[in-house]
Image (spheres, rainbow, N blue to C red):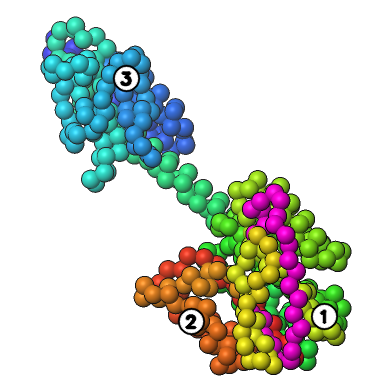
Amino acid sequence: MASSSGSKKRLRLSTFKLKALLEITQSINGNTSVQALLNQFSVILQDYLHIGKVIIFHHKDNWRIILRSGVGYQLVQEINFEKDIQPHNEIVHITYQDKEPLNRFDFIIPIFHKDKPLAYVVVGDLDEETTGISPSIKHLQFIQTLANIIIVAIENKILYKENLEKEAMKKEMELASKVQSFLIPQNESLPQNDKIFVEGYYHPHFEIGGDYYDFMSFNDDEFAFCIADVSGKGVSASLLMANFQANVRAMLRQKMGLRKMIKELNAIVLSMTKSERFITFFIGEYNCKTRELQYVNAGHNPPFFFDGSKAEISYLESGTSGLGMVDNMPTIKVGKIKVTPNSILMAYTDGLVELSYNNKVSVRQEDIEKIILEERKLSEIIYRVRIKIEQSSYTSHYFDDISILGIQFF
């Protein structure tokens, strides 16, 4: 009779364990939350197996406790995770250790994936004074199996969430990239006639970046152009630049003058960024009849200016500080140039002169000067610079967006 009773008891226990595993599996398949799974694990151990003390240390960005059941906060504080728990890479029986507070528990069960520790489960019996075989010992294999299932499920949930976030970010980047594509004018839309020849080139570091250039005609003889670079990268830089471009175009239509325009743009950038970002900016206005070029350089890389009559290169530096750097801008100096036939202006962002190839600077100002002096034709100049850029980007890392806007005056 006793043997029959023991067999029935073992059968009931085996049935319970199979049922518990099935319920856990169904919960996982039903996309139950992490907290609900942990609660389910705790109930199985405490109510059915009489294992009342459970702590689970889990690693995501760092080690933290994701489950504490039947254990006081003070006791947890006494555990030195790095010294008492983390060194173990296999199941450890700790009941008979002299060291407090570990001797209040029975086992440390490490959960590994390959060589990487995912979690440590620390368990102890509900009633330490009970005679007979400890429930922790009796059900150790089952606890380990259950813990493995739970932790793997948690890891899968984390990975799934990360993949969702990556997918959302990818869509956000694609949207921002489309927005930015509207900011950068295509070469087909830029004037190439008997007065001027305009060509641009844009090479983003990522799918989106913080560079921008633009061209705007007022009439057949007057136009404005600009190039800018926002500090930082990514979606926020792209959206800031989109807002900035809208303001630039609105102000150009008002023909308020370059000095006033720079002051207002500085105030706008400050209000949008709270001094956390800034924008370097170069803007010019040209009149084909008077052949006068007016410009302001707000902290940007000075564009190259090739004087067609003297065959000399100078840099367009007159202006002020970058936009969004200070509340009260220094004196804004408007530069003025009389443009002779076959002169060339080439503006660029700093990514161009930060390129490296075989651990050496790939494109230097002197290199561009040499190309300008040798070619004296904008389309050929930009072509040769592009070759250098694309050669470097295939063989080395480049760290910034690269933009070029060139104008040849006839």
Mark 2 closeness class: few <14, some 14–19, many ≥20 residues within 10 Å: some
Whether residue 342 is in magenta: the answer is yes
Residue 125 visible (yes or no)? yes
- Residue 388 disc label: 2
Given residues 290 and 182, the one toward you in this image is: 290
> Could you tell me which residue is drawn at 52 percent across and 65 percent down?
400
- Mark 1 residue element: strand
Q: Are marks 3 and 2 in contact (CB under 8 Å)?
A: no
Judging by the rendered image, the residue that carries numbered circle 1 is 287
Relative placement, left or right, of 410 versus 210 is right
> Could you tell me which residue is drawn at 70 percent across and 55 percent down?
329
Q: Main SS of the magenta segment?
A: loop
**Mark toward the start of the polypeptide (1 vs 3):** 3
**Nearer the camera: disc 1 or disc 3:** 1
Q: Position of residue 370 (x, y in %)?
A: 53, 87
Relative placement, left or right, of 89 versus 195 is left
Could you tell me the amino acid type at mark 1?
Asn
Q: CA distance from mark 1 to mark 3?
A: 75 Å
**Mark toward the start of the polypeptide (2 vs 1):** 1
Q: Which residues are magenta?
A: 322-347
**Mark toward the start of the polypeptide (3 vs 2):** 3
- Mark 3 residue element: helix
Q: Position of residue 363 (x, y in %)?
A: 48, 78
> Could you tell me which residue is drawn at 86 percent across and 66 percent down?
255
Name the image quarter holding the N terminus: top left
Relative placement, left or right, of 217 versus 274 is right
